[in-house]
Amino acid sequence: MTDAVAPIDQAELRRARVVAASYLDSEGGGLSEWLLATDHKRIALLYALMITAFFFIGGAAATLIRLELISPHGHFLTDDEYNHVFTLHGIIMVWFFLVPLIPATFGNFLLPLMIGAPDVAFPKLNLASWYLTLIGGICVLAAMMLGGVDTGWTFYPPYSTAFSNSNVAVAVVGVIIAGFGTIATGVNFVATTHTLRAPGMTWFRMPLFVWTIYATSLVMILATPVLAITLTLVAADRLFGLPVFDGFRGGDPLLFQHLFWFYSHPAVYIMILPAMGVVTEVITCFARRRVFGYAMMVYAVLSIAIIGFVVWGHHMFVSGQSVFASLVFSFLSFIVAVPSAIKVFNWTATLYRGQITFEAPMLYALGFVGLFTIGGLTGLFLASVPIDIQVTGTYFVVAHFHYVMVGGAVSAYFAGLHFWWPKITGRLYPESWARFAAALMFFGFNFTFFPQFILGYLGMPRRYHVYPPEFQPLNVMSSAGAVVLAAAYLMPLGYLTWACFYGKPSPANPWNAKGLEWQTSSPPPKRNFLRTPIVTEGPYDYHDLDIAPEPQARPVDAARAHD
Amino acid sequence: MSAFPIFPREASSFAPKTDALYFTLVVLSGSIALLVFALIIVFAVRYRRGSSAPRGALPSLIKNEFEIGWTSATLFVFLMLFWWAGSNQIEQLLPPAQAMEIHVVAKQWMWKIQHANGAREINMLHAPIDEPIRLDMTSQDVIHSFSVPDFRIKQDILPGRYVESWFRATKTGTFRLYCTQFCGTAHSGMVGSVIIMSKADFASWLAAQRPAGDLAGQGRALFTSLGCAGCHMPGGPIHAPDLAGLYGRRVPLSNGAFALVDDGYIRDRILDPRSNPPAGYDPIMPSFKGEVDDGEILALTAYIRSLGSSRGALQ
């Protein structure tokens, strides 16, 4: 080639180096470069820092709750303080931790990478979403500092509108503001998925994580506005006396519950669908096996997202709604469990005839499958009206949704965090510590929450500051488990922070994983790919269909060989 | 009650049915969970990297038939469960026509029970065994929920609406009653007891329930049950006159005049509190016209008088 003799253009080379530099370095490390970043990867890190802070605030509240419940009479909190603490725990954990947990961190970081795009469709809107969530969170914390909120995260009127002497309006406004952040994120991700897929990235070549983020974004867009309207009406009652939910002035408190759960049940799927996506990516990579039933998994995700919109009434079986409405919602709730069951079976079947290794991401992912299975199966109890009558409003429900959201979504978050850690930071995390933390989290979690199923069927009501003495042994067990769980959550904070500075440098694709995010450097450059990738195969081609996977040496094995 | 119960007592006609469904679900979901866990563990060990277990492509049978098979099996099992749970629920829907009626009024943070013969109790509900009991319930303020776990019943109680629940107790004894819908500061103190007695014991208990004590005692009960105590107790959230030591005193009114607190004045204030309230108080008290009869006003007056007369009456 004659071009080869052309003199090297130094300016061109410098530009190429800048383009190829990691997103962590290329734009400068100053505070303003981070706080005004529009790169989806930097925004993902902003979200990660923010939700970590909220996680430890909400976790501190949980610690107070479990400490207080060691004794049936309480010991250091008053009734009102206890009510403030569990309300803080609920509001922070639901809206400022679980809802943004996976979509706003891994969704932001990985969605463009996985579909071969340079960024999301609206990078500035993406940054605005972060600020909205942050401002909402600050409002809620301000409400807490100014004297607290005591309604529980559900804000049921008429207690929240006419009776609570606490800062309901400020907290509600905070949640509404954060809700706009969620809606903007959803719009951004839907537009990104539709318009920015690389050549060859057809819908059915998208990784399942992208499918779950896409479905989640649709739920965010369709459900969150209903929450905003509902909470606006609560605020309007408190501030201006608008009696929409007041039974004595022509309103209806049940209307609030219908509207609230119309959002809040789909919100559960905002939390769990992306978790399913993460776990699918991890299991297929560490089993070195194509995902079993890819198409079925896609349909399962979409049907969960759709049917999830019509099951809200199962939160209201004892509320006074019509019994026939309850039966319809019971039926639909059983139906929505079917696609979830399919996913569990498919994850299990993906392991069959694999070449399985058990690094920390895989341990967290298998822990997810176990805990999500228990969480999902106990959902069947709650879908059955007679059993729901016994256990709704009790610790059974508390245990059930912690299994799904904490055992499920948070385990999946840690699976993803370890799996993509080398990609995000360019460094490896310490494997033995991570495995130990994964095991500890699994046992600590069960130790904490399993006793609560028993407490619930016995009838111990949730949100009780003092309780009958016969419930004490199970509460002490639960609190003891919470100590283990708290230690397990603190460990990654320690060793991952360490790994940021002292971890071994990671190769671009340490796990030999499929997926476009592994085709670029670790950490990726600002615009993700130096050349737009062209996609020619499905997402999980770990082996030819009719050939078994062989045991492989992966770059991570070599990198760790000297440990 | 054992010191460390792990399962609630079966004390109503609903309990065995709910429990049968519950145990079926425990066994069924336990088996599904064990199956999944066992498969994961077996696969994890057998197909660990580099093990000698044979691999190869999946048999085509596994690919399609399995998927369809377990989807339909799951759907079938779930529909069976729905059918069972649903029919169970419809059976329990309506109370028998001849059910005995007990009224329940929930308020922050107290259960007020009234029997058909007028007997009242607070945070206790006496009822006979083997008799269908219909609970006619309403709330005076926020949403509460009437929950008796040993009976497997629970029903939210809405302000401004009457809701129904019913049970037929099958064991005598004392059973815990909880409020299970968060209702404010002392939510966890809104507990009580359901006391189930033999029919003969209940009949004699009920006969012994004369309207409580003397007139002032009745007035005290009314003072609580009508919600007066919510505002007219010192330290309450609402600015309302403390009634202790008020009887017989001359009080300034908002129009500048003075009034003597006597029986007539108290009656006027109960029935028409909005006009010309005492100086320094907003006219926020609701009228009780139509809510209380004359006998009850007498009882209330007697109670207020019993709170102490002003030493310096008529100064």
Image (cartoon, rainbow, N blue to C red):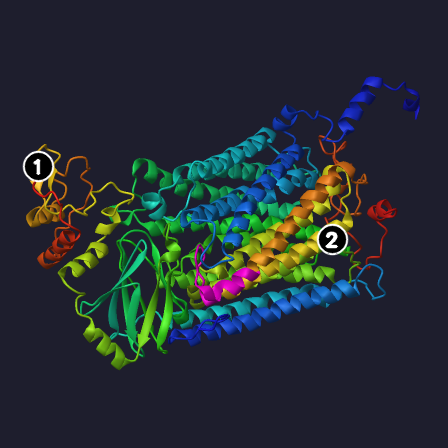
| Image: magenta residue range | A457-477
Residue B250 on image: x %, y %: 10, 40
Camera-side residue of A457 and A556:
A457
The residue lying toward the viewer, choosing from A547 and B260, is B260
The kind of secondary structure element at disc 1 is strand
What is the three-letter code of the residue carrying label 2?
Arg
> Please, which residue is most extreme toward the bottom here?
B200
Residue A339 percent across, percent down from the top left: 58, 59
Q: Nearer the viewer, residue A345 or A482?
A: A482
Q: Position of residue A80 (x, y in %)?
A: 41, 47
Q: Residue at point 41% right, 64% down?
A: A327
Mark 2 and mark 1: Cα distance apart in space? 80 Å
According to the picture, the residue beneath numbered tag 2 turns out to be A435
Of marks 2 and 1, the one in the foreground: 1
Q: Residue at x 42, y 62 (%)?
A: A328
Q: Is residue B56 above or below residue A107?
A: below
Q: Is residue B222 left or right of residue A302?
A: left
Examine the rendered structure and indicate whether residue A116 appears above or below residue A295.
Answer: above
